[in-house]
Image (cartoon, helix red, strand yellow):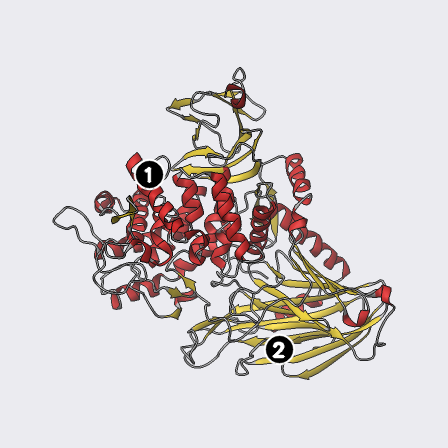
Amino acid sequence: MMNTRNSPVLFALIFLAVLTDGTIRAVPAKVASDKELNSDGDFLKGFVPTYNRIWISTPLVETTDTVNAPVMGNGSMAVCVSGSDDKQVYYMRTADFWSDEGGVGPGPAVREIPSGCLTISLEGRNAPSAPAEKAVSYRQEEDMLNAEIKSDLPFSKYGLKATSYVAATENTMVVELSSLKPVWVNIELNTDVYDRVASHSTSAGVDGRILYLTRETRNTSDSRWVSRNAYAARIFGARHITFTTVDASHARATFEIPADATVKIVTCLEGGKNAINPLPATKHRVAVFNDSGITALKKSHRNWWKTNWWLKSYVRTYDDTMDKYYFRCLYQLGTMCREGFVNSGLHGPWKASDTLHNYSCYCMNDMGACSYYLALMSANRASTAKMWIQTVYDWIPEGQRRAVNDAHLARGVFFPVHWGPWGSVCYTNYWGQKFCASLASVVGNWYYTDTEDVACLRERIYPFMRECANFYEDWLTKEADGKYHVRGASYESPGDNFQNSCEDLFVARILFTDIVKYSRVLGVDSERRGKWEDIRDNLSGFSTTTEHGMTVYKADSSTPFEASANLIQTQIIYPGYTCNRRSAPEIRQIGYNTTLQAAKFGGWSQDNMRGQGLFVAAQRIGGFKVEDLITHYKAMLATRPIDFPGYIADAGLWEFNNQLCLQCYDHDVVFFPDYPLDRRLSFKRLRAPGAFLCSGEFRDGAAADLSVYSEKGNPFSVIGPWGETVPIEVRELGGNQMPTRKNGDTYTFDTVAGKTYRITRRSNMPHPAQRD
C-alpha cells in the first residue's frame, strides 16, 4: 500500500480520518455545497476534454527531457506509455526508484530509472488481417478528467483498444483491452527499458496464474540505499490463458480476447527505497482481486480525481491557448505531486531509460525544481507542497555537514545546486551560490502562510528555517555602515568579487521577516528574535544600475544587467515578493523598470524564467497592460510548452492564470487587477494567505459573484473590487450582513471558521460601467 509518512493527506474538499482498523474514511468539509460542486463538475466536463492531449504516432519516451507521452500516476507509482503499431509498452516505477550510482561513469551520482515494463502485443497465430471496417488508426488520448489513457492500437487491423489507469490511492494499474473480433494477445512483464543496465538485478516468473517481475537499483558495498520494486499481474475475462517464464527478466502470458468483450489486466506494485522483499506483498494484493473489486477500484479512482483534484479549484480564462496549458499542467502535476512521497527531479517521475536521465536532481540555481508548488498552493492543492517540505527537511544532516566542511561555518545548512533525495547529490557543485538552501525554504514558508498548518510549521518548516537562519547568522557580518552585506557569492558566479547577491538578499528578507513571526506562533526562540530582527532591518539594499535611462535592479554589484544569467533579478519581485503595486512609489518604479528591461532582453521566452516569474512579476508590479502580457504569454506557449513542459519548471508557469484572478499583498487581496474590460474570467476556490478560499467571476467589465470561505476564522481584507469610491457589502452565506472596517481602499471584515461570505457592491450603487 502507499506510504504516507504516517501523516494524513490534507484535502481542502475532504479531510481524511484514519480509523482503528487502518482504513481511511472521507469526512466531508463544508467548503462548498453538493449542488455547487456538482455544477462545477458539469462545467468542467463541458470543455476540459477538448484539451486532452492526443498522439497519432508513437509517443516519445527515449529522451533526456520530460517524456512527450501519455502519463499516469498517483505520486508513488509513475507510468508513461509508448510503443508502436504492433505493441503497447507501459514503463513503470515507484517515485523513490532512484539508483545510487556512486559517481560511477560520466553521469550523475544519483539517477531516476524505470523498474519494469508491461508490454502488450499480438500473438503470432492471428489471421493476417481483418475486414477494413474493423480497423482502427493509431491513437493515444490522455483523458485528464478521468485520469485514464485511451488507446486505439492498429495491431493487424483487429480493432484493438485499451483503457488504462493508475489507481488514485494505491499502486495498481489496470489495463482494459477490447477487440472488435477475437484476437490472440501476448502480455509481458519485463525490463526492456532503453539502455538497460544489466547489473541491476532482476527476476521474473509465473506463480500459478500470476506473472511477476522484480528489479533493484545499483547494489554494491558503497550503495547508501537500494530501491526494489516488485510487480504482480493477473488477467481477468480472457480465454485460453497460458503462462511462460521466458528468462530472468521476462514473464509472459498468452490469451484470446473474445469479440466485443473486455479483458482486464491488473498489475500491482510494491517496494521502494530499502524495501527488503516486496514480492510476497504484491503477489498477495493481486491475488485477492476479483471483478467486483476492479469495478470498485475504477469508481473510487474517478471519484478521487473529481473530488480531490479537479474540484479543489479551477480557473477559466475562456482563451483556449491559456486554458489548454493550465489544465494540462494540472493533470501532469496531479499524477506526480502527493503528500508522503518522494519529489521527482527536473523532468518528472516518468522514466523509460536507465542512462538518459542525467538531470535527476533538484536544481536550485533558481526555483526550477519546485516552482510548480507555488502555483499548486494558489490553486488550493496546498498539501502537495508537503512533498517538497519533507524533501528539504530530510537534507538537514547533509546540509549541516556541508555548512561546516564546505562553507567553513559553525552552523546552518549549505546546499549544492544539484541535489537529490535523502542527502544525495546529482553533481557536487555550488556555482558560487550560498542561497540554495534558503531558496528551498520558500515553499514551506508559503505553505504555512496559506494554510496556517501549525503542526507542519512546528515539525518540518520551522526547524529547516532555523537552520537557514543559523547559516546567515554565521556568514553575515554587520559592517561599519550598519548594514549586513552579502560578499563573495552570487548567482552562477563563482569567485570572491561579487557583493549583494539579489537572491541571497531577497531570501534572507523573507527568512528573517517570517521566522520572527513563526517563533512567536510556536512560542520558541524568543532570545534569538533580537538578532533576527536586526538582520531583517539592516540587510543591504539591492544593487542597482541605469539601463536605457531607467534605474533597475542588478543580480549583484558586479554583473552587468543584461549579463545576468536568466535575468535573475526579476525574482526580487516574484517569488521574492519584495516589491509590488502596493510598494512605495520609488521601489515600485525600480521593479517596473527591471521587469521592462528584462523583457527587452528576451525575458519573455527564457527557459528558466518562464515558469518562475517574469509574467507574474509583471502582473504583480503593475503598469503593464494585461492584454499585452497575455499576448506575450501565448506567444511563448506557442514556442514549446503548450503540448507538455519539457522542463518541469514550465509546469509552474500557469501561476500566471491564478494571478490574473487574485493577487495578495501581505494579507490584502485584490480581485482581477487591471483585467481587460472586454475579457471574461472565472475561478473557484483559489487560496489566499490566512487560510481563505476565494471564488469570483469577471464579466461585463466588472467583478461579480465574489465569495470567500474561511478555514481558520481570521479577518479578511480586500482591496475594493469596484474602486475606492464604491462601497462593498459583505454577507455571511445564509446569514446576516457583516460589518466592515475601511482603511483607504481596503475593507476588512471578521470571519468565522467554516463560513462562506459573499462580497457585493452596496445595493444602491450603480454598475461601474454605468458610472463611467
- 436 relative to 30 in the view: left or right: left
Disc 1: which residue: 588
The amino acid marked with disc number 2 is Asp
- 166 relative to 412 in the view: left or right: right
> Label 2's element?
loop
Disc 2: which residue: 192
Give residue 284's position: percent from left, percent from top.
66, 68
> Label 1's element?
helix
Q: Does the rendering let one see residue 89?
A: no
Q: Are marks 2 and 1 in contact (CB under 8 Å)?
A: no
Taking depth in this image into account, of 521 and 142 the one nearest to the observer is 142
Image-quadrant location for residue 204: bottom right
The amino acid marked with disc number 1 is Arg
Q: Where 562 falls versus 378 (above or below)?
A: below
Q: Where 378 falls versus 674 (above or below)?
A: below
Q: Where 75 falls versus 155 (above or below)?
A: above
- 485 relative to 723 in the view: left or right: left
How many labels were placed on the picture?
2
Give residue 250's position: percent from left, percent from top.
66, 80
